[in-house]
Amino acid sequence: MTSNPRRGPYICGIDAAMDVVTGKWKSLILWELDNHGTRRFGELKRGLPGVSEKMLIQHLREMEQDGLVHREVYREVPPRVEYSLTEHGTTLNDALRPLGAWGTKRSQRLAAEHELVS
Amino acid sequence: MTSNPRRGPYICGIDAAMDVVTGKWKSLILWELDNHGTRRFGELKRGLPGVSEKMLIQHLREMEQDGLVHREVYREVPPRVEYSLTEHGTTLNDALRPLGAWGTKRSQRLAAEHELVS
DNA sequence: TCCAATACTTACCAAGTAGTAAGTATTGAA
DNA sequence: TTCAATACTTACTACTTGGTAAGTATTGGA
């Protein structure tokens, strides 16, 4: 199965936000789509080195169900599918910014500690 | 084993932050400690209905290793152990606030949609 | 008729995450 | 000597997450 029981009863706001953002590549997809506005499946794949097609499509489907991502199909040959953020996706990305800044500082701190050791 | 390979090479800040905050109860522990300042193991357990002792201690240990939580042991009978946030834990909690606010709005939206259906 | 290009889809497997339930450690007081 | 209270610790299990690799679907053009 691809989908699991989500949208459950949440204990608090963090809980509700984590539910849609948990997944190895989801925050990166958010970032990638926010950066480029619109991306095709293949572009996303190339933009996220290491992601498998299975996980990419699985995450995109869940994010679509969660109202974060919009999927537009163009009936051409070869087929073209474009993904973009919805308004909710954009606001989620904004809400993640302070966390990203904290993580960046943490990375720098770890790197500095590693410097001292080596 | 309790610990897994963490503190890996991170792709971005979000990634680095997610690494320390991922875990079913971690954000709740953060919130609980921020709210009360200091909590004993048993108090935390009672404050997080449904958490198992195994997961609680496992998360606390990881958060201690990650420099988010401070553990203070009082050699009394019966034993007393107090947990509190470090400065990094406090700033992480601050960085999570916008995400929590977003999640709260999402919960309200979902509840409203559910109202319409029922 | 077959091929090329893109976007999936599926089966299978390994590793990680979390729950249950029972056991351990400490030590002062009765 | 045993007990009580707190804070863990361990073994076992089930479920979830993510990876690999191969296959499918679509359809215009050569």
Image (cartoon, coloured by chain):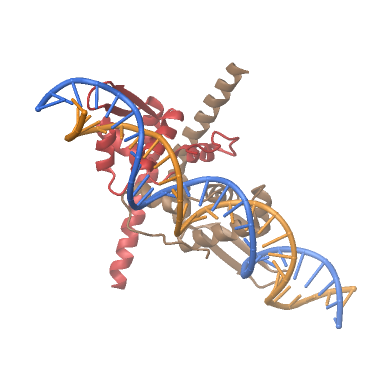
Chain colours: A brown, B red, C blue, D orange
**Residue B96 image offset from top left, x and y in percent:** 39, 39
Location of residue A68 with respect to C2 vertically, above or below: above
Q: In the picture provided, is A17 more to the left or to the right than A80?
A: left
Q: Looking at the rendering, which quadrant does residue B37 occupy?
A: top left
**Residue B86 image offset from top left, x and y in percent:** 37, 26
Q: Can I make out residue A46 in this image? A: yes
The front one of C15 and B16 is: C15
Q: Looking at the rendering, which quadrant does residue A66 occupy?
A: bottom left
Q: In the picture provided, is C15 more to the left or to the right than B70?
A: right
Q: In the picture provided, is D30 more to the left or to the right than D11?
A: right
Q: Residue at x 54, y 26 (%)?
A: A110
- Counting labels gives 0
Q: Can I make out residue B94 in this image? A: no
The front one of A96 and A84 is: A96
Q: Residue at x 32, y 28 (%)?
A: B84
**Residue D13 image offset from top left, x and y in percent:** 45, 56
Q: Residue at x 44, y 34 (%)?
A: B62
Q: Residue at x 54, y 36 (%)?
A: B6
Location of residue B10 with respect to A75 vertically, above or below: above
Q: Quadrant of the C terminus of chain A?
A: top right
**Residue A107 image offset from top left, x and y in percent:** 54, 30
